[in-house]
Image (cartoon, grey):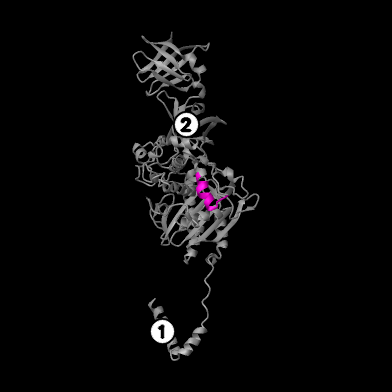
């Protein structure tokens, strides 16, 4: 550096000596000095980007991709690549609609910020002041949770995504079931990504605005920003003129998959949009909450969204990328020494990435129609390297190498036959004994049925065969396109030796979710229950089985509070609230109820009908 400076100085001095003798000569020479070259066009640094994108799309077998770049107020690049419909060869355009997945979360936070600006919401007051019926499994979290906590992933709850994924529950039903979901960490102690808390944030928007979350976002964000084709459901996208189909990789083959409808958990991830419209949204955040000269969100709330609120643990893997924090609906980190704000999104068949550098006033939106893939990150980093005037990092090679090592590790385990399976075991019961409905207060019902001499599990309308693994454990077979692929299902017996519970590892950060066998609907009908009612002699005591209403049996023992009989299967009922106590009614060959058997920890007794 010093040698370069010295050489430059010597040249300048030499020129001064030549021209210094005559001011007139100096002026004449100055007039002949060639003009400075015109500054390069804003998009000049992106020359060759098209070829780069086309190559990495081949490397990752991505059917279609769209990207847009904004610098300052100008969109300097906007283009589609590949196909939105492979079979029909329909091209991707900047107007093609893709699912943006979790990028939706920042829209929900923006909506909340607008309510804060209007004085209807406070980031740091308890949620229960705004939602009096809000309740979690953890009482402390229930009382102290704030709107800021809802949108910074520090509730103490792990993902519990199986509650909402492909669920038939409404938004309100999922909201009411939160109280039955087990936390894995203490409130506010750890970052744990959670979609259900963002769904709850959407409920906050609805209750305080008096409008559906979708209607509020459309009116207060989409319309002012000119996002006319953006929507909240893949059903709406399918009616649009330009939308992408979803694709996934099954081994080495790219296959079209069905759209995943996630409308009810919408505030966490249901928006569909194009790069043409999403780049306007990025520009809105680069402008600190303004759309042109119109302020939609206060500068304070816009800044809070882009400021660290909760650290995200993890070691640094690459020198170019700094430690991450979560802001309000956006991740905050650094890239190449510059502040970098981003959020990715992924739902069946789609991967997206929104990102921007506030100080440099640069933003990038990438949408793809294949999951999984790393292209949104690879393409975005390539663009930032170019616009920052840096030698581009070969992120494509890095991510391809990571993928290769992961695949080799998995393949090696298969070749060596490593498995936790205990060979030579069998289930304790005939397969029909495992069939039935199993319920959980939060997750709903898991159904096990007999099919083709085997078992079949259905949960949230997703079905998979179950093959015996060992003992009471069954396994969903390999199928890359089935969300339940490889899941273990463990049955357990009660004290009487009957199959009673089904454990499914639906959330890896808590113990397996235990579903308890539930009775067939007919066991709650009056026509089924009424013949069981009457008086029975249990030893020296007369007890009464009485019908309460049209759907409940009660066991009345003199001198004790009545016991509710909970239907199990056949003619078997459990005593509610008492472990190990049950009664099973018996019929004679003519179908008349003649007695019941009382199963108790201290013995088994017969009660004759009077």
Q: Nearer the viewer, residue 27 or 52?
A: 27
Q: Which residue is mark 1?
A: 10
**Horizontal and vertical percent position of residue 165:** 50, 40
209 sits to left or right of 451: left
Asked if labels 2 and 1 touch by Cβ distance under 8 angstroms, the answer is no
Q: Is residue 278 above or below residue 500?
A: below
226 sits to left or right of 538: right
Q: Nearer the viewer, residue 233 or 203?
A: 203
Q: Which residue is mark 2?
A: 426
Mark 2 falls on what kind of element?
Answer: loop
Badge 2: how crowded within 10 Å, few (<14), some, or many (20+)? some
Question: Which quadrant: the N terminus?
Answer: bottom left
Residue that protrudes farthest toward the top in the picture: 610
Badge 1: how crowded within 10 Å, few (<14), some, or many (20+)? few
Q: Is residue 581 above or below residue 501?
A: above
Task: Specify which label sits upstream in the sequence, 1 or 2.
Answer: 1
């Amino acid at each position: 550096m010093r040698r370069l400076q010295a050489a430059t100085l010597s040249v300048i001095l030499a020129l001064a000596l030549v021209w210094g003798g005559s001011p007139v000569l100096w002026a004449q020479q100055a007039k002949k000095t060639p003009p400075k070259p015109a500054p390069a066009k804003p998009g000049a640094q992106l020359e060759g980007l098209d070829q780069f994108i086309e190559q990495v799309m081949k490397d990752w077998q991505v059917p279609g991709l769209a990207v847009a770049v904004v610098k300052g107020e100008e969109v300097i690049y906007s283009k589609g690549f590949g196909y939105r419909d492979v079979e029909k060869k329909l091209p991707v355009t900047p107007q093609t609609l893709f699912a943006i997945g979790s990028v939706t979360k920042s829209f929900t936070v923006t909506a909340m910020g607008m309510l804060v600006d209007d004085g209807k919401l406070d980031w740091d007051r308890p949620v229960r002041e705004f939602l009096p019926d809000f309740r979690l499994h953890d009482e402390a979290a229930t009382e102290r949770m704030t709107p800021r906590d809802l949108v910074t992933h520090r509730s103490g709850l792990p993902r519990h995504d199986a509650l909402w994924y492909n669920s038939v529950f409404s938004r309100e039903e999922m909201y009411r079931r939160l109280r039955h979901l087990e936390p894995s960490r203490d409130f506010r102690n750890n970052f744990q990504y959670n979609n259900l808390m963002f769904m709850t944030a959407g409920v906050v928007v609805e209750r305080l605005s008096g409008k559906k979350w979708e209607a509020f976002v459309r009116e207060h964000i989409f319309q002012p920003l000119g996002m006319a084709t953006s929507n909240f459901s893949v059903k709406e996208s399918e009616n649009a003129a330009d939308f992408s189909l979803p694709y996934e990789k099954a081994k080495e083959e790219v296959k079209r998959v069905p759209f995943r409808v996630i409308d009810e958990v919408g505030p966490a991830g249901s928006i569909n949009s194009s790069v043409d419209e999403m780049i306007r949204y990025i520009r809105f955040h680069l402008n600190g909450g303004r759309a042109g000269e119109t302020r939609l969100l206060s500068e304070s709330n816009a800044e809070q969204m882009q400021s660290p609120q909760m650290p995200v643990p993890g070691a640094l893997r690459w020198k170019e990328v700094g430690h991450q924090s979560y802001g309000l609906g956006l991740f905050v980190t650094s890239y190449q020494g510059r502040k970098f704000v981003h959020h990715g999104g992924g739902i069946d068949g789609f991967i997206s990435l929104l990102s921007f550098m506030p100080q440099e006033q640069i933003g990038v939106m990438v949408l793809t129609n294949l999951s999984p893939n790393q292209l949104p990150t690879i393409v975005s980093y390539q663009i930032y390297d170019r616009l920052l005037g840096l030698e581009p990092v070969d992120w494509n090679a890095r991510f391809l190498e990571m993928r290769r090592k992961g695949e080799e590790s998995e393949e090696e385990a298969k070749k060596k036959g490593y498995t936790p399976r205990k060979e030579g075991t069998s289930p304790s019961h005939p397969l029909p004994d495992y069939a039935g409905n199993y319920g959980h207060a939060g997750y709903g019902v898991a159904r096990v049925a007999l099919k083709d001499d085997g078992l079949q599990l259905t949960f949230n309308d997703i079905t998979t065969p179950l093959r015996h693994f060992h003992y009471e454990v069954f396994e969903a077979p390999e199928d890359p396109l089935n969300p339940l692929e490889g899941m273990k299902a463990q049955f357990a017996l009660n004290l009487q030796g009957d199959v009673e519970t089904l454990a499914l590892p639906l959330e890896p950060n808590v113990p397996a979710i235990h579903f308890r066998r539930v009775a067939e609907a007919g066991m709650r009908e009056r026509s089924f229950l009424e013949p069981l009612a009457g008086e029975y002699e249990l030893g020296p005591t007369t007890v009464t089985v009485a019908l309460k209403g049209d759907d409940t049996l009660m066991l009345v023992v003199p001198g004790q509070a009545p016991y509710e009989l909970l239907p199990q299967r056949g003619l078997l009922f459990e005593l509610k609230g008492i472990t190990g106590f049950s009664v099973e009614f018996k019929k004679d060959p003519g179908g008349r109820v003649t007695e019941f058997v009382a199963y108790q920890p201290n013995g088994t007794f017969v009660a004759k009908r009077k």
